Structure formats: structure tokens, C-alpha cells
Image (cartoon, rainbow, N blue to C red):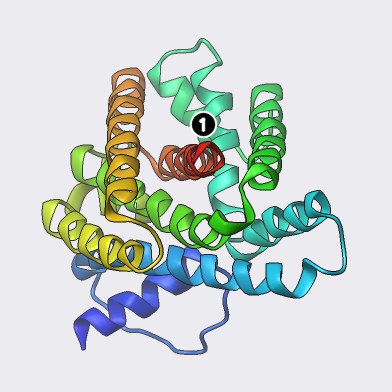
Amino acid sequence: MEELKALILSIQFMTGIPIPINIDVKEDKIYKIASYFPVVGLLIGGILYIAYLLLKDLFSREIVMTFLVAFSYILTRGMHIDGLADTFDGLFSNKDREKIIEIMKDSRLGTNGVLALVFMVILKILFLSDIRQSLLFSALLVSPVIARLSVVFSIAISKSARGGKGLGGLLLERAGLREFVIALLISTIAGYFVMPLKDLALLYVIFLSFTYLISKYISKKIGGMTGDTLGAVNEFVELIAFIYFSIL
């Protein structure tokens, strides 16, 4: 029952999908939701593929992919792309650690954040449009799963830059190897049914290496990770997955 509660909370936290269920979970147990982030990715990927099937005969491929990218941000309430923008505003401000974190918390968007947001959206549309038809099902389902698995991995290898404040901080302080192993198992089972294991394994190597490097770089700059920087990891890894599938 506790795991089912964690799954529902994970979907409620990571998406805007309406689930009219009030879950009562103690704060010291909420970190378990990290285990089910890949399930959220699978759900989003499935919805995007259904949307693709509904739109593919109505518009050109580029327009359809634009709709899909926009719809993905609607499904997630723009959570991750907002984190990417805030991360770029903070990290490229040339300020000290405390000021960087303060800038990330500011709701206003700066030039660096706008540029990161615009280029991320454009690149996602371009690489999605470049993926072969035969690989599109795998790309749309696996990429969101891998991206959210990368978030769990970053959580497992990092600490909170804000001393555990906020839900992101709580996850960074409490979630660890157990949550990553569960998330990895879920991701591997999901990926097994839609792409060859050798391709999935190569994708794991790429995303694990990238996530490790970017998490350590950010941690060196601000002393850990935050909810915003975890969102940035999600965005980057999803883009890398799209690039990977466009090359296959």
C-alpha cells in the first residue's frame, strides 16, 4: 500500500494529470516517490505517442513534433523546462554560491534562462522530426523514462544545496541507492519491450556518464543539487535521448 501511495504521489507531483485522490504520507516517507519517476516518464511517453497517432495524418511531421513537445510541457506543467531556465540564469550569472541559489529561486526569467529555454525547445523539435518512423515509438516511450531515471540517479549521487529545503531538497537528502535500483529495474523492464537491450545499455552508459558529470559540475558550483538543477538534468537527458534515436 505504501508503494502504491508513492506511485500516485509521484504522478501527482511530476505531472498535471488530474488524479482526484488525497494521499496522506508522512514527510519522512515521501522520498519513496523517486522510485517511480520512470513510471511517470512511461505514462507521459504513452500519451505523447497516442497524440502522435491522432495528429500524424493531419499535419506535416515538423508541426506534429512541435505539438508533441508543447504537449509534453503541458503534461508536466513546465516543471523541468522552468528548472532548466532557472539553472542557466543562476550558473551563468558569474556570482557566488549564495547569489546563484538566490537567482534560481527568483521567479523572474533572465536572458540566459530564455536562451536555454528557446534552444532546448527548438532542438527537441528538430531531433524528434529527424527520428525515423520505425524508431519513433521507442523514442517517445523510452526518452521520458530515461530522463526521469537520470533524475533519480542524480538524486542518489548528490546532496541538497539548500540543506534539504523544499521537496527537491527532501528527495536529495533522503532518497538513495534503493530508489535508484527500483527506478532502474522499472526502466529496464519498460525499455526491454520497445528496443534491443544492447541499444538500451548504450543509452544507459551515455545518460549515466552525462548525469554524473553535470551533477558533479553543478555540485562544485553551488555545493549540491536543487529541484531546479534536477529539472535541468531531465531536460538535457531527454534531448540527448532524442539525439541518440535520430542517429540510430
- Indicate left or right for 30 with 12 as reference: left
Is residue 90 positioned above or below 33 on the image? above
Front residue (pair 216, 110): 216
Q: Residue at 40% x, 43% y: name it.
A: 230
- The local crowd at label 1, few if under 14, some if 14 to 19, many if 20 or more residues have their Cα within 10 Å, is many
Q: Quadrant of the N terminus?
A: bottom left
In the rendered structure, which amino acid carries the disc numbered 1? Thr
Quarter residue 179 falls in? bottom left
Q: For mark 1, what is the residue? A: 87
Is residue 145 positioned above or below 203 on the image? below
Q: Can residue 161 be seen in this view?
A: no
Quarter residue 59 falls in? bottom right
Image location (x, y in percent) of residue 173: 20, 48
Q: Residue at 66% x, 35% y: name it.
A: 123
Image location (x, y in percent) of residue 199: 34, 47
- Indicate left or right for 123 with 20 as reference: right
Q: Is mark 1 on a helix, strand or loop?
A: helix
